[in-house]
């Protein structure tokens, strides 16, 4: 994967990643919103921060990521879930943090 990791990158270098974000929105109109970043340092990558575990699960399903590929962890005393996936030549890092009690509540509802 060739990427420009300089401050001289142009917006056009990010076009593949930005196009993928638009395609995901078009193909999955009910996908929960997320904070999505794309940087000139990694123009072929998107970082997707989802607001809640249910939204994270929707993103996981939309991107056809197996449950066993989800990486659990902690961040600042909260539970963190994440996964990495490549779609075409774009890398996505999708993650969510939430209080442990929220995970237990959502698990009980399932």
Image (cartoon, rainbow, N blue to C red):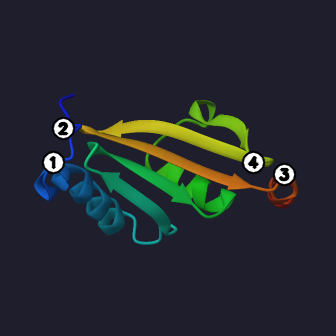
Residue 97 at x, y percent in the picture: 68, 53
Residue 53 at x, y percent in the picture: 68, 57
Q: Which residue is mark 1?
A: 9
Q: Give the structural element (helix, strand or loop) at label 3.
A: helix
- The numbered mark, 2 or 3, whose residue comes first in the sequence reads 2
- The numbered mark, 1 or 2, whose residue comes first in the sequence reads 2
- The numbered mark, 3 or 1, whose residue comes first in the sequence reads 1
| Residue nearest the viewer, comparing 13 with 106 | 13
Quadrant of residue 82 within the rendered picture = top right
- The numbered mark, 1 or 4, whose residue comes first in the sequence reads 1
Q: Are marks 2 and 4 in contact (CB under 8 Å)?
A: no
Q: CA distance from mark 1 to mark 2?
A: 6 Å
| Residue nearest the viewer, comparing 89 with 46 | 46
At a point 15% along the width and 48% down the height, the residue shown is 9
Q: Give the structural element (helix, strand or loop) at label 4.
A: loop
- The numbered mark, 4 or 3, whose residue comes first in the sequence reads 4
At a point 17% along the width and 30% down the height, the residue shown is 2
As drawn, the label of residue 100 is 3
Instruction: Sort mark 3 into few (<14), some (14-19) or many (20+) by Cα contacts within 10 Å.
Output: few
Q: CA distance from mark 1 to mark 4?
A: 33 Å
At a point 43% along the width and 47% down the height, the residue shown is 63
Q: Which residue is mark 2?
A: 4
Q: Is residue 10 left or right of residue 25?
A: left
Q: Are marks 1 and 2 in contact (CB under 8 Å)?
A: yes
Nearer the observer: mark 4 or 3; the answer is: 4
| Residue nearest the viewer, comparing 110 with 13 | 13
Q: Which residue is mark 4?
A: 76
Residue 50 at x, y percent in the picture: 56, 59
Q: CA distance from mark 4 to mark 3?
A: 12 Å
């Amino acid at each position: 994967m060739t990427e420009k990791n300089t401050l001289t990158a142009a917006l056009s270098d990010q076009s593949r990643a930005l196009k993928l974000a638009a395609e995901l929105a078009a193909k999955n109109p009910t996908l929960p919103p997320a904070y999505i970043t794309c940087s000139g340092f990694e123009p072929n990558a998107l970082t997707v921060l989802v607001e809640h575990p249910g939204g994270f699960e929707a993103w996981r399903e939309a991107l056809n990521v197996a449950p066993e590929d989800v990486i659990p962890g902690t961040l600042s005393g909260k539970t963190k879930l994440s996964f990495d996936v490549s779609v075409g030549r774009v890398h996505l890092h999708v993650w969510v943090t939430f209080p442990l009690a929220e995970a237990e509540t959502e698990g009980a509802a399932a």
